[in-house]
Amino acid sequence: MRIYDTKRREVLDLEVGPVVTMYTCGITPYDSAHLGHAAVYLTYDVLQRRLRDAGCETRCVRNVTDVDDDILRKSRELGVHYLDLAAQEIARFDRDMAGIDIMPVYSEPRATSAIPEILSLIGRALEAGVAYEAGGAIYFRVANFADFGAVSHLGRPEMLVLAKENGGNPDDPNKIDPLDFVLWQQSLPDEPAWESRWGPGRPGWHIECSALALRELGESVDIHGGGRDLVFPHHECEAAQSESVTGKTFVRYWVHVGLVGLDGAKMSKSLGNLVFVADLLERADAGAVRLALLGHHYRFDWTWTEDDLAMGSKRLSSYAQRSGRRDGTGLLDDVRAALDDDLNTPAAIAAVDAAPDGTDLGPALGLLGITL
């Protein structure tokens, strides 16, 4: 298998052992799962199916960010406890993912479960000289990590813009450098707080994923990713703080998924231009939704239209009518070859489309997670 690595900016041979460790950034549970989420988790689902088909064991961790600025802001607006909001949205998310036949992940840890590991990691960062205390918070000092920017390949002006857009608060006067990022912060009076040797507070966003990945999978992870919008600042910062402490390569292959748009803009909760998985499942079968998404290559941005779902439903119906008992080994090999070519699901679907009537489509569609 060959796959595109964001950091090295090329399609590379995927050289992994019999056990493949994977970490994909999960949801912040304050609203329903939309197609942008589904595209990410479906990509990792198909990747796991092909790796398992090739004889590997996969261990995919998908975290839950159950404490951060977004969920605390939403819980405040709704007047509910942040963990009650999280529980409600996690249950809805799990239903949606099961609804489109996403395999259960190896582990789905919550950020609040890792406070001891987070505090330990911050302490190690301070000891390593890559973090500092100021204004009651602990910051990571990006200037002390020589490879900062190696994942995203962005220049400083672009980093500053993205940091500001994604809660990085580059105007914080306590920072030595505007790009320095928070590891530990003081909680507001109505926010949860945990005791630490730097005073009560709560973790920053980036340190949560590093602590969970290191705890669940060890110091080096084979494959890590999520949506393309997480490359900076989130994954850049994860790599910096993790490698500063462990001295080892944090991620061997960075695999990011393109953004799904609607009406000319990225689908996002902040804009409200969302298509929800649950709504689609009221109108179409799981296989049709999967085909609608897999008809687009995972790595590139694309825009959702109703034609995607219509085509997915049409394909699923056609496959059910055309599938027969004729040997489908050749088709299975073609689908495997397509997936091995940077997870080219459109080519895999095209191979199924071109199969002669009467071919047993089941094994090939199984690699795409589709049951007739």
Image (tube, grey):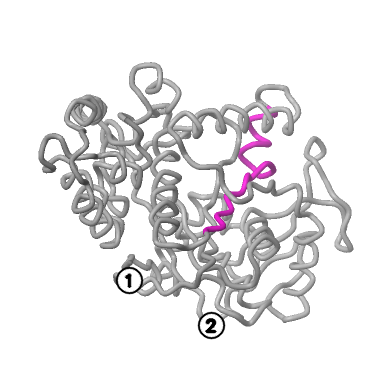
Q: Which residues are magenta?
A: 58-76
- The quadrant of the image that shows the N terminus is bottom left
**Rendered position, 242 above or below 280:** below
**Rendered position, 291 above or below 51:** above
Residue 153 shown left or right of residue 77 in the figure: left
**Rendered position, 372 above or below 362:** above
- The quadrant of the image that shows the C terminus is top left
Residue 247 shown left or right of residue 344 in the figure: right
Instruction: Classify residue 271 by image quadrant.
Output: top left
Residue 32 shown left or right of residue 368 in the figure: right
Q: Is residue 357 visible?
A: yes
- Report the disc number at residue 146: 2
Instruction: Choose mark 2 or mark 1, whichever is in front.
Output: 1
Distance (Cα) linking label 2 and label 1: 19 Å
Q: Are marks 2 and 1 in contact (CB under 8 Å)?
A: no
Residue 21 shown left or right of residue 85 in the figure: left
* Residue 65 shown in magenta: yes
